[in-house]
Image: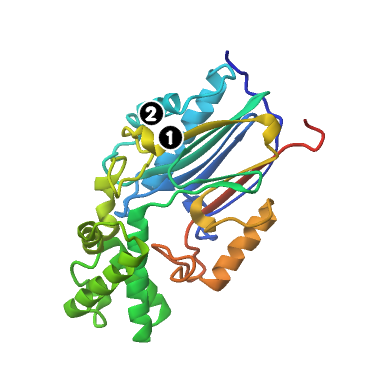
């Protein structure tokens, strides 16, 4: 039996670009329609190329948003299956602006919520986050990011010991995170030479053997040498390093999360992008922003408790961030 979508939830939301002075650079976006909600985290490739002024992450996010909004309007108020959603998205990607290549790493991560009179439907693809009732949390992590985060931390700490200026340190460590430790980069001169790279690879491998004891040393070596530029070969591929990305190519069912919950079980729902680095205890936008400020205070460079493939610097945050909070009205049953 088909179930009509309704809107019985209150909402609160916030989104911010990693550069607060360039809000149009935000690759996050959200949808807050009656009965249909989503957070979309655009992911660009590492080329930095733009198409009519937009990054690949922004293009992908717009394609996905348009599809969800169209389905919301045309699907006669019925809940959407993840398979149907992706079929429509993949068809739309074929018409995306010239230059968008699904074989590259550009695309988006996605979390969608639909509501009807009796149930909620949840769809998650990638590392966009979901929390239900402040306790049931869904946050995926990708092994390739874990490896590259360790790589970046190793380079950052190496340069820190040499007392390299923080701005230069961040730029060099990010460059090696993207390109890997296979070849010395000119940006790292005169602090990092080929011998240093060998030491960095060995030391980082030892760290990763502890963090990822079941990971193949061969795979670790491949990523350490190739950095984030190694990512595209693992997109939407069943592999130890495989991960999902909504980019117009087929996504294995193992990477797609879909489930329903009875309305009676739901009090709050939080949809968020990974720019918050975890969740707060509270469930308001203010709570999320306080958590964000805590993270920025204790680990702005993202080489400690919140280790990442990039950090904050020069009034630029590590990533775009978006939070959309749904709450059941107090007089609802």
- Residue 172 circle label: none
Q: Relative to 230, say whether 236 is above or below.
A: above
- Sequence-first disc among 1 and 2: 1
- Rendered location of residue 71, percent (x, y): 51, 24
> Is label 1 in contact with label 2 (beta carbons under 8 Å)?
yes
Instruction: Identify the element where label 1 is drawn.
Output: helix
Residue at the spot x=62%, y=48% of the render? 135
Q: Is residue 156 left or right of residue 290?
A: left
Q: Is residue 171 above or below residue 234?
A: below
Query: Quick one: 257 or 302, which is closer to the camera?
Result: 257
Q: Residue furthest right?
A: 331
- Disc 1 from disc 2: Cα separation: 7 Å
> In the image, which disc is placed on residue 92?
2
Q: Is residue 198 left or right of residue 301?
A: left
* In the image, farthest residue toward the front: 214
Q: Which residue is mark 1?
A: 63
Residue at (40% x, 48% y) in the render: 43
Residue neighbourhood size for the residue with mark 2, other residues' Cα within 10 Å, grouped as few (<14), some (14–19), many (≥20): some
What residue lies at 53% left-to-right and 60% top-to-bottom?
Answer: 21
Residue placed most toward the observer, 317 or 257: 257
Q: Point out residue 48 in the picture as x, y percentages from the top left corner.
A: 33, 54
**Tally of marks:** 2
User: Residue 107 appears at what percent x and percent y?
Assistant: 37, 42
Q: Which quarter of the rendered picture does the C terminus lie within?
A: top right
Position of the N terminus, as image quadrant, is top right
| Residue 212 horizontal/vertical position (percent) | 34, 60
Q: Residues within 10 Å of mark 1 (few under 14, many from 20)?
A: many
């Amino acid at each position: 039996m088909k179930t009509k979508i309704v809107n019985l939830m209150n909402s609160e939301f916030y989104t911010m670009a990693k550069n607060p002075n360039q809000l149009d650079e935000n690759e996050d976006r959200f949808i807050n329609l009656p009965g249909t909600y989503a957070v979309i985290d655009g992911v660009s490739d590492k080329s930095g190329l733009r198409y009519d002024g937009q990054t690949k992450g922004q293009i992908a996010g717009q394609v996905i948003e348009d599809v969800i909004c169209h389905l919301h309007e045309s699907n006669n108020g019925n809940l959407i299956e993840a398979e149907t959603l992706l079929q429509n998205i993949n068809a739309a990607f074929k018409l995306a602006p010239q230059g968008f290549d699904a074989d590259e790493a550009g695309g988006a991560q996605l979390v969608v919520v639909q509501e009807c009179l009796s149930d909620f439907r949840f769809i998650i693809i990638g590392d966009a986050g979901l929390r239900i009732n402040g306790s049931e949390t869904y946050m995926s992590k990708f092994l390739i990011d874990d490896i590259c985060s360790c790589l970046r931390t190793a380079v950052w700490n190496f340069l820190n010991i040499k007392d390299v200026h923080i701005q230069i340190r961040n730029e060099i460590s990010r460059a090696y995170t993207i390109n890997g430790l296979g070849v010395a980069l000119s940006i790292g001169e005169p602090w990092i030479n080929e011998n240093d790279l060998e030491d960095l690879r060995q030391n980082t491998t030892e760290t990763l053997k502890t963090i990822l004891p079941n990971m193949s040393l061969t795979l670790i070596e491949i990523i350490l040498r190739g950095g984030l530029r190694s990512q595209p070969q693992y997109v939407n591929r069943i592999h130890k390093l495989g991960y999902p990305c909504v980019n117009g190519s087929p996504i294995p069912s193992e990477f797609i999360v879909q489930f329903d919950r009875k309305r009676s079980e739901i009090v709050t729902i939080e949809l968020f992008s990974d720019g918050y680095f975890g969740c707060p205890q509270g469930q308001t936008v203010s709570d999320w922003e306080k958590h964000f400020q805590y993270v920025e205070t204790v680990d702005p460079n993202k080489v400690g408790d919140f280790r990442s493939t990039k950090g904050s610097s020069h009034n630029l945050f590590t990533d775009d961030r978006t939070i959309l909070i749904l709450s059941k009205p107090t007089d609802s049953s």
